[in-house]
Amino acid sequence: MQELDQSGRFRGQIASYSLFESDKDDSQSVGIRIVVLIDSIYQDGAWHDWRQYSLTTSGLINVIKRDGKVNERQVQSLMEHAGWNGRFDAIHENMWTPDPISVTVEKDTYNGDVSYRNNWINAYESAASGSSSSESASELDKKFGSIMRVFEKNITRNDTKPVGKLVNPPTPPTPSVPDEDIPF
């Protein structure tokens, strides 16, 4: 098997996984390292079979952040899409049977070395188009609308240039003159 050497949207089966705990003193991060055996690529609006290439892609899914807090989005993604039950011993004891998934793979450069790593896990059958419906747009407006309006008002306010003449322009300060006789 060969490591994937391009970015894109792929799907396949998690072929291996392991628990990773940071050994840095200032980090409490915990991740699950996964290797995915690729079976298809999403290109030109459709999934195309790539099993004949025997490619893999890998990545570290951080489930506990460096500050010791749970990385809710990653945990939820692993549970919903890969069938993880949230138990670390299931990973350590190799008792987890992952569901097939799709992954977003992106280019990663570290210390001058280039690799392509899993960036995000999605459902195997998920649409790769990223389309939206009017219902979901309406829900997003309900959920985030007030925050977005604050951003919009701040940008509009900060972008607006004053027009016309200042009504009461400030008067420049008068320089102070010492009380002594000036010899000129």
Image: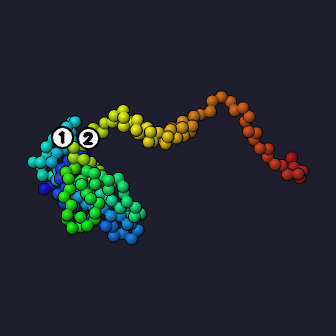
Q: Quadrant of the N terminus?
A: bottom left
Q: Amino acid at mark 1?
A: Trp
Q: Which residue is mark 2?
A: 128
| Rendered image quadrant of residue 135 | top left
Q: CA distance from mark 2 to mark 1?
A: 9 Å
Residue 47 numbered mark, or none: 1
Specify few, some or many for label 1: CA neighbours under 10 Å numbering under 14, 14-19, or 20 or more: some
Decide which of 118, 102 is in the foreground and name it.
Answer: 102
Instruction: Report x, y in % for residue 46.
Output: 19, 37
Instruction: Report x, y in % for residue 7.
Output: 25, 47
Residue at the extreme top of the image, as rendered:
164
Q: Is residue 148 above or below residue 165?
A: below
Q: Amino acid at mark 2?
A: Ala
State the SS at label 2.
loop
Question: Number of marks in the image?
Answer: 2
Specify few, some or many for label 2: CA neighbours under 10 Å numbering under 14, 14-19, or 20 or more: some
- Answer whether labels 2 and 1 touch (C-beta < 8 Å): yes
Residue, x 40% and y 38% (percent of image)?
Answer: 139
State the SS at label 1.
strand
Residue, x 31% and y 36% (percent of image)?
Answer: 131
